[in-house]
Amino acid sequence: MRRNLFFAVLMAVMVIPMLSNAQQKPFKLGLQVSPGLGWINPDETTGYESEGAGFGLTWGFMSDFALTDNYFVSTGFNYLSNNGKLQYIQGHVVDGVVVNEMTTRKYNLKYIEVPITLKMKTNQFGAMKYFGQIGFGPAFRVSAKAEDSYGAFVEDLDISDDINLFQAGLIFGGGTEYYIDKSTAITGSLVFRNGFTDLLGAVNEAYDPAIKEKATPFTVQLCIGVIF
């Protein structure tokens, strides 16, 4: 217990001066929009193969909380789009008969994400600052749509029951802030999300009922915003 108390006091001694020495607003708020590409990486032992990327648009609010002049905790709220294509064998009812067909499914998945990252900014050079960030992105599914193509058929589906409610991934990014006055900046960054939780939540009966589906999502986005 004494050791835990020692470390708690040590952390307080380190963090409190950083908070008190920040020479700027304690927090900033902003808006951003993020077009990007998403793809899905399946476990191929489950009978799935990746069939390419899909375009998606993410938008949301962002906030930076100052630790020091150059270090921030960045969080916010995103309406996150995850897209991609998978190919696999699936059973379909054709003329009243279940037929196993090679199927290409185009995913259109929407999540509410609350990212938490550490943002590291340079000092200001003219009107510019540069930054890198790394963190974690927990997200909850709000919509799951798909387009299945098999044989001569194309079918639009709601696949909410086949997609796990929760997903999470690592966030890596880097970009710039262009200050148009002392506190307002236009931001631009490239952000990569590396999913590490299973996206799929069902079993493919047509391939092997004993094997659970498994795949993880990835996105690359160009984030453009303004922060005050």
Image (cartoon, grey):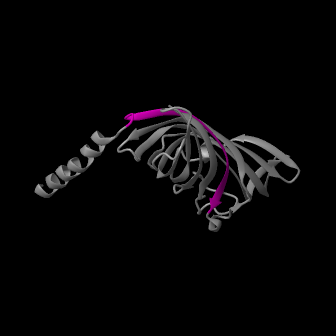
Front residue of 142 and 123:
123
Give the farthest residue toward the front.
Answer: 126
Is 93 placed left or right of 223 in the picture? right
Residue 226: give x, y in percent of width and height.
57, 34
- In reply to whether residue 40 is colored magenta, the answer given is yes
Residue in the picture at 83% in, 45% down: 154
Residue 97 in view (yes/no): no
Which residue does the image show at 48% across and 44% down from the upper left? 115
**84 relative to 185 in the view: left or right:** right
Pick whichever, 10 or 209, lies toward us.
Answer: 10
- Nearest the camera: 51 or 80? 80
Q: Is residue 31 magenta?
A: yes
Q: Which residue corresponds to the image point at 60% horizontal and 54% vertical from the top-left? A: 217
In the rendered image, residue 142, in percent from the top left (x then y), is placed at: 58, 37
Along the horizontal axis of the image, is 27 left or right of 9? Answer: right
Is residue 56 visible in the rendered image? The answer is: yes
Q: How far across and how far down the image is residue 69, in percent?
A: 38, 44
Task: Give the residues drawn in magenta, as a range.
Answer: 24-42
Residue 47, compared with residue 224, is above or below; it is below
**Residue 123 pos. (x, y %):** 45, 48
Quadrant (top left, top right, bottom left, bottom right) of the N terminus: bottom left
Q: Residue at x 38, y 40 (%)?
A: 66
Give the total of numbered labels.
0
Residue, far bottom: 45
Q: Residue furthest left?
A: 2
User: Is 118 rendered above or below residue 44?
Assistant: above
Return the residue nearer the eye: 107 or 55: 55
